Image (spheres, rainbow, N blue to C red):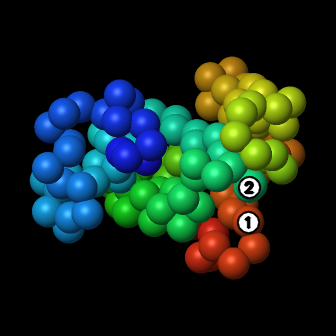
Amino acid sequence: MLRKYPNWFSDHLHPFWGQPDKLPFDNHWFIALCAPRPFLSLEGDRDQNVNQNGVYQSLLAARPAYDFFNGSDRLGVSFAPRPHGMVQGDWDALLAFADKFLMAKPTAQTFDRFPPGIGLSPK
């Protein structure tokens, strides 16, 4: 991503190219900082820009912060059947997630499903 879209990232990230183990923090830290607020990751199951296992690992690593605040149910993910870009399924998931956590409305939708072969549910 850094090579393809260098303008998306700070110049301070460039020295870490090919050395992710030397980064001072990881993506899951940013997610954990949201705890206990609701967090939903909207992804496409065929999005060439999505590292599905990375999303799984980030949510899994952020879970202890949510658990600390008894908010593990507020950490969610939704994979829509799509390549890059948003589709109606993303909007449906986002609005259901908002209804659940901002409006206290019940929803039948779950927010813990990953594509087949990507870890286990992070719960």
Where does the C terminus fall, quadrant-wise? bottom right
Mark 1: few, some, or many residues within 10 Å (few <14, many ≥20)? some
> Which residue is nearer to you in this view: 24 or 36?
24
Residue 109: where, in percent of width, then height?
A: 81, 46
- Image position, residue 29 (x, y; %): 29, 49
Residue found at x 59% / y 76%: 119
Residue 45 figure quarter = bottom right
Of labels 2 and 1, earlier in sequence is 2
Mark 2: secondary structure: loop
* Residue 9 x %, y %: 31, 34
In the depicted structure, whether residue 71 falls above or below residue 88: below
Q: Are marks 2 and 1 in contact (CB under 8 Å)?
A: yes
Q: Amino acid at mark 2?
A: Asp
Going 43% across and 58% down the picture, which residue do you hit? 58
Residue with the mark numbered 1: 115
- Which of discs 2 and 1 lies nearer the camera? The answer is 2
Q: Is residue 11 left or right of residue 95?
A: left
Q: Which residue type carries mark 1?
A: Pro
Among all residues in the image, which is located at the extreme front?
Answer: 3
Residue at the (63%, 73%) spot, across then down:
118
Label 1, secondary structure: give it: loop
- Name which residue lies at 82% across and 32% down: 87
Instruction: Classify residue 94 as left or right of residue 34.
Output: right
Residue 73's tag is none
The residue labelled by disc 2 is 45
